[in-house]
Amino acid sequence: MSLRPIVRYFTHSLMLPILESGEETLVGGQAVMEGVMMRAPHSYCVAVRKASGEIVTDEVPVPRMSEQYPIFKLPIFRGLGTLFQAMKLGYKALTFSSNVMMADLAAAESKDGSKDPAKDGQPSAKQPPKELPKWALTGNLVLMFGSFLFLYKFLPLYLATQLGKVYPTLTGRLAFNFADGFIRIAIFLTFMFALSRLKDIQRVFQYHGAEHKVVFNYESGEPVSVQAAQRFTTFHPRCGTSFLMLLMIVSMLFYPFIPFTDFLPKLAMRIVLLPLIIGICYEMIRYAARHPGGLLTVLTTPGLWLQRITTKPPSDQQAEVAIHALEHAMSLEKSQGGELVIA
């Protein structure tokens, strides 16, 4: 089995929070491998273009977290519920797109006659896998969360601690935590820039741009089409890129209040505080999306700047895939009697 699909799957999974956008009452989506997932309040559809040019979809009804568990109607908690469901659906969409790619690779190898050497005059029954194995899915999930904690919790804290030993002025609580925050942002920006140089990821960022354009087109009230969508910008305030950048900025305001001085307790508190900070950032993004031009919009501006890296202008064919996903999600939403509230 080729390692490329597994490596690509892992690399893409690290970007799930960056590529995801949307909330319970709004249309949102996510870029996947050669496709786009679109989400309405009660429906989900991921559309992927195969190597043959055919667009295949996976669509299912999705109940709101707040309808299943009333606690997720409350401020702060609704952000946690929404993020959890978005990550769950994003992982499902990514797995579907990966399996489509695996099937394309298997078909290409079979067409080229790629088989094991014949044994006893009979061709081997071994065929290329058409789906990622379960061990790859499980291992990827563990590596994804482990990488997040290492890159954005452990490593910045460790580097700031080492800098504090060299520069005593950084040992103060405020100075230390701001140094920790700037290191975290630097790691994030470096990671995103490095990924953006990869050819496969550049295509993902194009699909990310397609998703944003089509969502903007839908929210404008104009009929959705490839030509109409292409007139809109690729920078959207509800993008996961903006959310992650805001998360890092708000963390810098919280961490100075952590009373511990030893490394491990500080690391543990950063992890413990993560759900609270996520909930607060979600409320800020939600408010900013409904009240453009205010102070909170200013706070989300760095994330919009960063979308110059994480979104790229899509081709018409890529926009077509995003529209296909939106139309199927909306059709499923309407069949359930759902209504949308446009920001």
Image: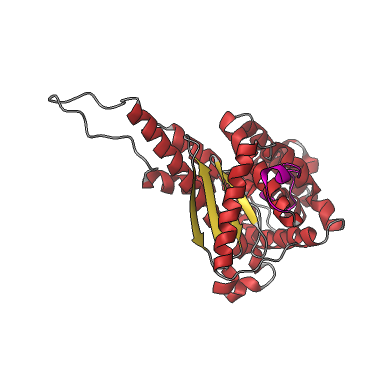
Taking the image as drawn, is residue 84 in sight? Answer: no
Q: Main secondary structure of the magenta part?
A: loop
Residue closest to the eye, 266 or 301: 301
Residue at 72% across / 51% down in the picture? 217
Residue 195 percent location from the top left of the image: 61, 34
**Residue 3 found in image quarter:** top left
Residue 319 percent location from the top left of the image: 64, 42
Residue at 72% across / 48% down in the picture? 245
- Position of residue 50 relative to residue 219, above or below, is above
- Position of residue 209 relative to residue 63, above or below, is above
Is the C terminus in the top left, top right, bottom left or bottom right quadrant?
bottom right
Residue closest to the eye, 36 or 183: 36
Residue numbers of the magenta segment: 223-241
Q: Residue furthest bottom?
A: 70
The mark total stands at 0
**Residue 224 shown in magenta:** yes
Is the N terminus in the top left, top right, bottom left or bottom right quadrant?
top left
Q: Residue furthest left?
A: 120
Residue closest to the eye, 265 or 142: 142
Residue at 34% across / 38% down in the picture? 129
Taking the image as drawn, is residue 286 in sight? Answer: yes
**Residue 331 found in image quarter:** bottom right
**Residue 281 shown in magenta:** no
Q: Is residue 35 left or right of residue 343?
A: left
Coloring scheme of the render? secondary structure
Q: Is residue 44 left or right of residue 152?
A: left
Residue 168 percent location from the top left of the image: 78, 40
Residue 266 percent location from the top left of the image: 65, 53
